[in-house]
Amino acid sequence: MDAFLTALSAFSDPYLLTVILIGTLGGVLVGAMPGLSSTMATALLLPFTLTMDPIPAISLLSALYCAGTFGGSITAILVNAPGAPPAAATAFDGYPLAQKGQAGMALGMAAVSSVIGGVFSVVVLIVAAPLLSRVAYNFGPPEYFALALFGLSMLATISGESALKNLIGGAFGVLLATVGMDFTTGVDRFTFGYWELTEGIHFIPVMIGLFAGCEFLTQASKLKQSRVRAVLEAVKLPGWADFKRCFGTICRSCGIGSFIGLLPAEGGTVAAMIGYNEAKRWAKDKSQFGKGDLRGIAGPEAANNAATGAAMVPTLALGIPGSATTAIILGALLAHGLRPGPHLFIETPSLLYAIFLSMLIANFAFAAFGFLGAKLFARVTLIPTEFLWPSVFVLASIGAYAMDQSIMDVWIMVLAGLFGFVLKRYGFSAAPIIMGLILGELVENSLKQSLIIFDHEWIQFLERPIVVTFLVLTMASMIWPLVTLFRTRRQERKAANAAQN
C-alpha cells in the first residue's frame, strides 16, 4: 500500500502528467502513419529517456506503447492503410464503413473498444500479474506450436465468402514464411541469390502492400468515376444501441487479448486476428462482416489493446518481452539499472505502480484524443483522391523502408500490392495471407524445436495438458463449420418440406 501511495504522489507533479500526455499524443500520431509503429517510435525515443528519471522515462514509453496501438486504427479505417500491424484486422470492416460515409462512427467505436480493452488489461496486470506470469512460464515450443496450429485452423472462416479461397491464401502465406534461412539446418530457401531474403520476408511490407498498395491501385482505376461525399454522416459517432450490440464482442476480445498478450513474443497482431475471427464466429448474422460491421472493429481493437497491458506481464515479471515494443521497454529498464523479474516487485514496487497508473492515464487520454479528433480525422475522406493516395503511397514506402533500411522491403511492398490487386479481383482476401505469414514461421520453428526436445517422438505432444487443450480446440474449430453447414441444410430441408405441405 505504501508503494502505491508513493507512486500516486508522483503523479501530482505536472511534469510527469505532461510527459504522459505527450507520449500519448505522439503514439496516436506515429501509429496513424502507415508502416510506422509504436515499436519504431519507442526505439527512436529510447536514447532521449536515458537522461530522465526512471519513472518519467518508463511512463513515457508505456504511454506511447498504449496510444500507438490505437493510432494504427485511424488510417486503417480512413484509407485502408493500417498504421500498425495489429490494425490490419480493423481495416476489414473499418474501411468499408468509411466508404459508406460513416468514418466518424468507425473511429468512435475503435476509440471506445480500445480504451475498454486497454483498461481491462491493466486491471488484469495489477490484480493477477503473479498468477499470469506462472501461466506464461509454462509455455514452451510444444505449447506455441499447438497455439499457432489453433490460429491456422481459423483461416477458413476469418474473412471472405469462400472457405477454399481463404485456405489457399493462408497456405500461400505459410509458404512465404518459409523464405529465408532454416534456423536448424542453416540452408537458404527460396532466396534466389538475394542475400536480403536470408532473414525471411517480414509481414509488415507484405501487409502494407496488400492493404495500402492494393487500395492505391484500386483507387487509381476509379479516378474517372464520381465520388460520393457524405459529410454529415462522416462525423456521426456511434450511439448507445451500437455499443450495446458490440458489448459481448468487446468482453470476449478483452479476454482473448489479455491471454495472447501474456504469451512472450506474441503481441497484439495475433490477438487482433483471433479477436476478429471470434467476433465473426459468434455473430448470428455474419453477412455484414467485411462490408462494414461495427463488431468487426470492436473485436480486433479491444483484443489488440488488451494485449498491451498483458504483454507487460512477462516483461516485468520474467524479463521476457511480451512484444517487440515491450522488448524496447525492457531495454530501457536495464539501461536505468533496474532488474526485470521477481526482484523488480520486491526492490522497486513504486515503479511498477507508476507504470500501471501511467498506462491507465494513457488509455483514457487516447480515448479523449480519439473522440475529440474523430470529426477531424473523418475529414480525411473528403480529400481528393488525386492528392490523398499518392501521399499514402509515399508514407507506405517510407514505412516499408524504415523498418530495416532495405530497398528490398519496398520492392516486396510493391509486389504485394500488385499481387493483392489481382487477388482482390478474383475474390481472395488479404487476411488469410497475413495470418498465414505471421503464424507460419511460429508453426515451423516451434515444431522443429519440439521434435528436438522430444527426440522425434510425436506421442510426447499428447503428454502436455496445454498442448492437448489447444489440439482439441483446433479439432473443434475445424469440425464446427461442418456442423453449422449440416444444421443449416437440415433447417432448409425442413423449411422446404413445410412449404410443400
Image: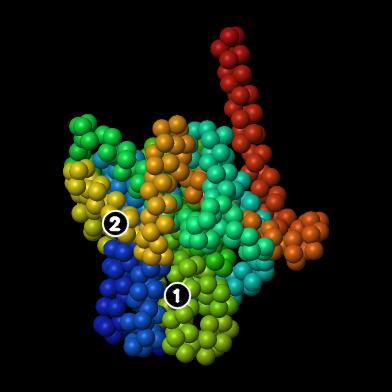
Q: Residue at x 61, y 46 (%)?
A: 153
- Select label 1 or label 2 by which is in front: 2
> Where 263 falls versus 248 (above or below)?
below
Which amino acid type is shown beneath numbered disc 1? Answer: Ile
Residue 297 visible, this orientation? no
Residue 37: which quarter of the image? bottom left
Label 2 crowding class (10 Å Cα cut-off): few <14, some 14-19, many 20+?
some
Instruction: Mark 1 or mark 2: name the one nearer the start of the chain.
Output: 1
Label 1 crowding class (10 Å Cα cut-off): few <14, some 14-19, many 20+?
many
Q: Residue at x 53, y 61 (%)?
A: 198
Tell me residue 197's x, y (percent). Answer: 50, 58
* 480 or 266: nearer the viewer: 266
Mark 2, residue position: 395
Which amino acid type is shown beneath numbered disc 2? Answer: Leu
Disc assigned to residue 410: none
> Where 461 falls versus 211 (above or below)?
below
Q: Residue at x 40, y 86 (%)?
A: 54
Tell me residue 411's x, y (percent). Answer: 39, 52
Tell me residue 205's x, y (percent). Answer: 42, 55
Residue 475 visible, this orientation? yes
Q: Quadrant of the C terminus?
A: top right
